[in-house]
Image: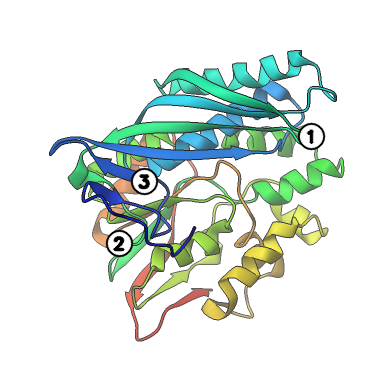
Amino acid sequence: MRGVIVTHDRNVIVGIDTSDDAGVYRMSESEALIQTVDFITPVVDDPFTFGRIAACNSLSDVYAMGGRPITALNIVCFPTKKFSLDILKEILRGGLEALKEAETQLVGGHSVDDPELKYGLSVTGVVRPDRAVRNNTLRDGDAIVLTKPLGTGMIATAVKAGAVDNTVMKPFRDSMTTLNKTASEIMVKHGVHACTDVTGFGLIGHLSEMLGKNMMEIVVDSRSLPVLPGARDAARNGMIPGGMYRNRNFVGGLCRADSSVPQDLHDICYDPQTSGGLIISVDEKSAGALIASLHAAGVADAAVIARVAKTESQRIVIK
């Protein structure tokens, strides 16, 4: 539906004609609804953990808009001839745990018998109409902050090959099962200009969406990128998901990398993420205070990873 303009209601603040993370609908001068839906296939074997990851992933779009999730509906595609319903119960229990932590009420859902297991949520949130954070409103001179480490796609591929031990598996699980709630609550206090979350299009794909139609460049400092333990090893060993290549093709000639950037780190920049962190664009003078607040609140991997500058043509540079 990208690029299709179908907005006909003046109360639609954010619709499907852009690549924002969720839709925003004005209910009054002081309140707007945020609406989003997302579901995924399993990235771990444990059904409870998968349920929690899927819920965190679905809730993230509301947090990226600077909002507060309030209700959710389960979306379940479950192969009843392949798996026991006890597995489904554990998936839903994992999702419910994440919803409780997010202070979001489950109000129903829908399920179908499907050959491939999928789970996620349709989430409704709230935000003040004038405080909804868009993804493409970055400004000249901004610093870009990433709140979670990269590499979930690489590690998930290594997991399928049985090439991961607990020193890699634990931070991989911990990252994906962590809500972006704290990071979102902190960012809105620092007057951020734009935000999105890192999911299937990878870091560079989502940075390209942040450029929108702005004639600007984003210069990524590859040395500053937070990366999950084991992700670079997985990339060097060829444990690369197919989505990485699709993401690179999607961005095309918009992005170039200096020859000094190691190939494995270059690949991780395109790695499709599940339940990734927030990418936040903020005035460079405010970036230090934002990072300090995030670290103090336990968002330990938050780092400034890029700078934004006005140019005559759009580009992303990895240095």
Q: Residue at x 56, y 71 (%)?
A: 251
Residue 214 coordinates in the image, percent (x, y): 34, 73
- Near mark 2 (Cα within 10 A), the count class, few <14, some 14-19 or many ≥20, is some
Residue at the left extreme, as displayed? 29
For the residues labelled 3 and 2, the Cα–Cα distance comes to 16 Å
Residue, disc 2: 137
Query: In which image quadrant can residue 204 be found?
Result: bottom right
- Pointer 1 residue: 115
In which quadrant of the rendered view does residue 218 lie?
bottom left
Q: What colouring method underlies this structural image?
A: rainbow
Q: Which residue is mark 3?
A: 23
Q: Earlier in the sequence, mark 2 or mark 1?
A: 1
User: Can you say whether 107 is above or below 147 in the image?
Assistant: above
Mark 3 and mark 2 lie on one chain; the one further toward the N terminus is 3
Which three-letter amino acid code belongs to the residue tagged 2?
A: Thr
The residue positioned 63% from the left and 25% from the top of the image is 111
Looking at the image, which is closer to me, 61 or 49?
A: 61
Q: Disc 1 residue type?
A: Pro
Q: Residue at x 31, y 44 (%)?
A: 24
Q: Is residue 181 visible?
A: yes
Residue at horizontal 76 percent and vertical 54 percent from the top:
233
Q: Is residue 99 left or right of residue 229?
A: left
Which comes sooner in the sequence, label 1 or label 3?
3
Secondary structure at numbered mark 2: loop
Provide the secondary structure element on which disc 1 rests.
Answer: loop
Question: Separation of disc 2 and disc 1 at Cα?
Answer: 41 Å
What secondary structure is marked by label 3?
Answer: strand
Label 2 vs label 1, nearer the camera: 1
Q: Residues within 10 Å of mark 1 (few under 14, many from 20)?
A: few
